[in-house]
Image: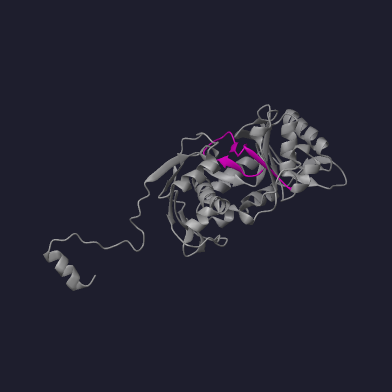
Amino acid sequence: MSTEQLKFAWLRGEQLETGDPTLARTPFSLSKTFYPLGFPVTVSTNCEEVLTCAEESWGSFTKLFDTEPVQINIGVASTDSLLCPPTPVCRVRDHLLTNIADGENFAISDHSLGYSLVWITTAALNHRDYFRYFFLESCAMGGISGRSATGIHGACVSLNGTGILLCGDSGAGKTTLSYACARAGFTYVTDDGSYLLHGRDDRLVVGNCCQVRFRPTAEALFPELRGRDLMERAGVGKPSVELSTFDIAQIATSNTAHVQRIVFLKRNVATQELAPFPTPVARMYMMQQILCMPFTAQNHSEAIDDLLRLGVYELRYNDLDWAVERLETLAREGC
């Protein structure tokens, strides 16, 4: 408004309407707390469908930990486009993280506050896998790992209270071995993505025990996978076959385990054996992703160093049944 318009409004005692070009006053009146991996995450939004997506992602989880809730505010703006936005680009500086697809679809997270602001278009929301993977779930897990737990690229199973962390490169067999262990009487915790809690001395790991995600070749090992549709997470992940553990009555599951053994996996070997694995190499493996988040690196480093005091093994194997039996011996006898 010009100065004359402002003066005229003042003289007439009119309420000043300034507009909201930056959407700063958009009400996020819809709000609900969810519990991904048992941690409280409060999602506030101006669109009911966002909460529906959050329910799809985390509706099966219940509260396990009494931590301060991660706060995610998600605004949805209308657009005529039907196209899925591009893959976001992530950048980090100190405690700030940005995840930007374009000028209308982005997330800004402050890990010092446990807070994320997300703006997306209706086009992004219409592509639910895209929205959930790149914005909703990434903000939640980033907030959780920034304050409460260290994410480790590894599967986890347990036997009679002894948790075993299974680590290794992509394709090393973490998913197939963890599932084979579950079929053999182990408790299944997660096939990938184990979160080590901070501030505890019992090395408690939490994971998503509700699903298992296989490579298509796993159909040859597990007949129950045959005929299932291939999934490609958000259009960028590797093709996979997803199995809900709720559908398999004979498998015991738990979201948590107390880790007492750490095992790196190596397939296609000349001799099947369980051998010592260099602890410094295990540390570098676990720290790779953490080093790109300098604000929280110290907490993660301390948690990993405490975990690695257990010692580390390498399971060199070709036969899946042999590997399961060897892990059972390791869990029961410690070697």
Please name the residue shown 54% across and 42% down the image: 56
x and y, in percent, of residue 192 in the image: 65, 44
Return the x and y of residue 273 as percentages of the image width and height.
83, 40
Q: Which part of the image, by quadrant, shows the C terminus?
A: top right
Q: Nearer the viewer, residue 36 or 126?
A: 126
Question: Can residue 182 be seen here?
Answer: yes
Describe residue 109's horizontal placement relative to residue 303 as left or right: left
Q: Looking at the rendering, which quadrant does residue 228 occupy?
A: top right
| Pick the front one: 108 or 308 | 108
Among the 4 quarters of the image, the one containing residue 207? top right
Q: Looking at this view, is 22 or 274 the one in front?
A: 22
**Residue 313 appears in the picture as rendered:** no
- Residue at 55% across, 54% down: 127
The residue under the point 26% across, 63% down is: 18
Which image quadrant for residue 30? top left
Does residue 196 belong to the magenta stretch? yes
Seen in the picture, residue 180 relative to 282 is either above or below; the reply is above
Range of residues picked out in magenta: 192-215
